[in-house]
Amino acid sequence: MERDINTIIQLVVKQARELGACPLLRGDEDLAGLIKVFTSPQGMEFCLRHRYPNTATFRLFKPFGVERFGIYIDAGDITLKNPNRAILVGRTVGTVACDTTERHEIVLLNGAKAVVNASKWSVAVIKAGSGCACVKNVSDNAVIL
């Protein structure tokens, strides 16, 4: 299985470089390192701008338990409470509750949908790619950006 993930990582790196990925992507990353690069501010901007990776490429990562990194691929209906970062991809519909003073980042890619309920003094930042939808509910002193 380790060999399979390395092959997938090399495919993703090659495709990203063809799209003009920044030098942060070195090509020797393991799964955690690749996710760190793609979830960095520059990485998320790249993904949103280029609509990359496509859903088929994301699905290659599903068997490797990327939920532990806050990435939910074709996860169906899910409920999340106070995630620092949640990346919803494809056929994922998330109900996200934010009520702590930490910053909550919710990213929607490749048709994902979400309902974000922010309350108390929470701050939620939502980034959505084309074809995605988000319903924003705010109460108390919460802010959704």
Image: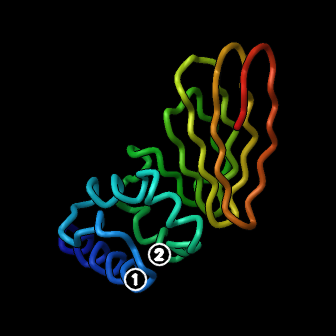
Quadrant of residue 13 within the rendered picture: bottom left
Answer above or below: position of 99 versus 51. Answer: above
Q: CA distance from mark 1 to mark 2?
A: 10 Å
User: Which residue does the image show at 53% across and 60% down from the upper left?
Assistant: 45
Residue 57, numbered label = 2
Answer above or below: position of 20 versus 49. Answer: below
Q: Residues within 10 Å of mark 2 (few under 14, many from 20)?
A: few
Disc nearest the viewer among 1 and 2? 1
Q: Quadrant of the N terminus?
A: bottom left
Q: How many marks?
A: 2
Q: What colour scheme does the image use?
A: rainbow
Answer above or below: position of 75 versus 5. Answer: above
Residue 15, numbered label = 1
Q: Earlier in the sequence, mark 1 or mark 2?
A: 1
Q: Nearer the viewer, residue 75 or 83?
A: 83
Looking at the image, residue 56 sits to the left or right of residue 93; the answer is left
Looking at the image, residue 17 sits to the left or right of residue 52; the answer is left
Q: Nearer the viewer, residue 23 or 120?
A: 23
Judging from the image, what secondary structure is the residue with disc 2 in?
helix
User: Which residue does the image show at 40% across and 86% down from the upper left?
Assistant: 18
User: Which residue does the image show at 72% across and 53% down from the upper left?
Assistant: 113
Q: Amino acid at mark 1?
A: Gln
Residue 102, numbered label = none
Q: Quadrant of the C terminus?
A: top right
Marks 1,2: beta carbons within 8 A = yes
| Position in image of residue 121 (x %, y %) | 66, 15
Q: Residues within 10 Å of mark 1 (few under 14, many from 20)?
A: some
Looking at the image, residue 91 sits to the left or right of residue 3; the answer is right
Answer above or below: position of 14 versus 145. Answer: below
Q: Amino acid at mark 2?
A: Thr
Quadrant of residue 60 within the rendered picture: bottom left
| Position in image of residue 42 (x %, y %) | 44, 57
